Image (spheres, rainbow, N blue to C red):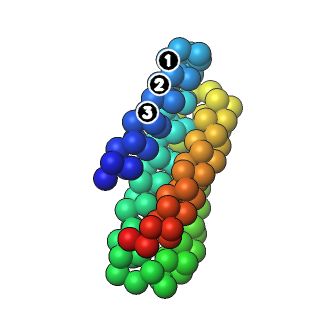
Amino acid sequence: MKFIISILIFGLGISGLVGGAIFPQYIKEIFLGMIAPLLVTIFSIIWIKKVYKVDPGKVTAIMTKSFFIKMVLFALYFLIILSFYAFEPIPFVISFTGFFILFYIIEAIFLQKLFQSGK
């Protein structure tokens, strides 16, 4: 749970810092670019940890399914955001891409720690 709270604080902190201090004119775009990868990563970590506790052998299959579900969700998110909201798309796409990569790295670190700990 501490890890999830840390990710949440980290994501909100980075988006607040970049959006509030560096590019205040794009704060909405930066936040919307951060929130979907953050929520999906948190859900994924919780789901993978539950599966790992029950049957570690199923983690790879769950991660594969999870990847495809994430791609569909992100595609729908992009469609909705870019179709119905009036804002600058370039800062949104840059924010989304940066946070997507960042949270995937964090998820990979989580998986490494999970497999090393054996819990």
Q: CA distance from mark 2 to mark 1?
A: 5 Å
**Closest to the observer: 93 or 103?**
103
Q: State the SS at label 1.
A: helix
Residue depicted at 55% across the width and 78% down the height: 60
Q: Describe residue 94's horizontal placement relative to residue 42 as left or right.
A: right
Q: CA distance from mark 2 to mark 3?
A: 6 Å
Report the amino acid beneath label 2: Gly
The answer to whether the residues at label 2 and label 3 have Cβ atoms under 8 Å apart is yes
> Against 16, is 95 above or below?
below
Q: Could you say where residue 16 lies in the image, as x and y percent from the top left?
A: 47, 24
Residue 111 in view: no
**Closest to the observer: 15 or 73?**
15
> Against 110, is 81 above or below?
above
Q: Residue furthest left?
A: 1
Q: State the SS at label 2.
A: helix
> Which quarter of the rendering shows the C terminus?
bottom left
Residue receiving disc 3: 12
Report the amino acid beneath label 1: Gly
Mark 1 neighbour class, 10 Å CA radius: few under 14, some 14 to 19, many 20 or more: some
Q: Quadrant of residue 52?
A: bottom left
Report the amino acid beneath label 3: Leu
Residue receiving disc 1: 20
Q: Could you say where residue 109 lies in the image, as x and y percent from the top left?
A: 55, 56
Residue depicted at 53% across the width and 81% down the height: 61
Residue receiving disc 2: 16
Whichever of labels 3 and 1 marks the residue nearer the N terminus, that label is: 3
The answer to whether the residues at label 2 and label 1 have Cβ atoms under 8 Å apart is yes
**Closest to the observer: 78 or 98?**
98
> Against 43, is 10 above or below?
above
Q: CA distance from mark 3 to mark 1?
A: 11 Å
Residue depicted at 33% across the width and 48% down the height: 2
